[in-house]
Image (cartoon, rainbow, N blue to C red):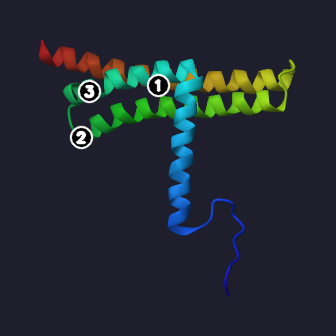
């Protein structure tokens, strides 16, 4: 039995290339349109090289980089929620405000997680060096 797929992005390797293009477009839009994303990306670009210095082992390095990427992922989701909310209506509405506030809270909690992981790692590095 053959499955007929009417997916707009197709199937197989062609779908992969279309998904990569969508990824590129999404990242480009975030860099161009979202100041918060640009700020967090700058932080990632500063901290990423430092991760090689302060990591105790490969797993520690993965944790340091993963929390940085998580911040970017959650910021992208938050930006998507904000864009979609504004697309539906720019009028003030309690549910639109709630959606945007929850997205912002998600970003803040993710930044807190990253700060905890990086803070403890930097502390351990400094204590180990002294």
User: Whole-Å distance between the Cαs marked 1 and 3?
Assistant: 19 Å
Q: Secondary structure at mark 3?
A: helix
The answer to whether mark 1 and mark 3 are in CB contact below 8 A is no
Q: Secondary structure at mark 1?
A: helix
Residue at (53, 64) in percent of width and height: 14
Q: Nearer the viewer, mark 3 or mark 2?
A: 3
Percent position of residue 22, x then y: 57, 47
Residue to which mark 1 is pinned:
113
Earlier-in-chain disc, 1 versus 3: 3
Give above or below for 101 relative to 88.
Answer: above
Q: How many marks?
A: 3
Residue to which mark 3 is pinned:
49
Percent position of residue 10, x then y: 62, 65
Q: Quadrant of the N terminus?
A: bottom right
User: Whole-Å distance between the Cαs marked 3 and 2?
Assistant: 14 Å
Residue to which mark 2 is pinned:
58
Nearest the eye: 23 or 70: 23
The answer to whether mark 3 and mark 2 are in CB contact below 8 A is no
Within-10-Å neighbours for mark 2: few <14, some 14–19, many 20+: few
Percent position of residue 76, x then y: 57, 32
Within-10-Å neighbours for mark 1: few <14, some 14–19, many 20+: some
Outermost residue, top direction? 130
Give above or below for 128 relative to 26.
Answer: above
Residue at (27, 18) in percent of width and height: 122
- Mark number, residue 4: none
Earlier-in-chain disc, 2 versus 1: 2
């Amino acid at each position: 039995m053959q499955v007929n797929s009417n997916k707009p992005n197709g199937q197989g390797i062609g779908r992969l290339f279309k998904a990569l293009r969508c990824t590129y477009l999404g990242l480009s839009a975030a860099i161009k349109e979202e100041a918060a994303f640009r700020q967090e990306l700058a932080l990632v670009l500063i901290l990423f090289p430092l991760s090689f210095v302060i990591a105790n082992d490969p797993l520690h390095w993965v944790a340091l980089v993963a929390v940085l990427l998580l911040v970017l992922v959650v910021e992208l989701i938050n930006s998507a929620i904000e864009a979609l909310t504004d697309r539906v209506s720019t009028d003030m509405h309690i549910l639109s405000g709630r959606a945007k506030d929850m997205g912002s809270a998600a970003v803040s909690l993710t930044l807190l997680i990253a700060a905890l992981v990086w803070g403890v790692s930097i502390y351990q590095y400094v204590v180990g060096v002294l």
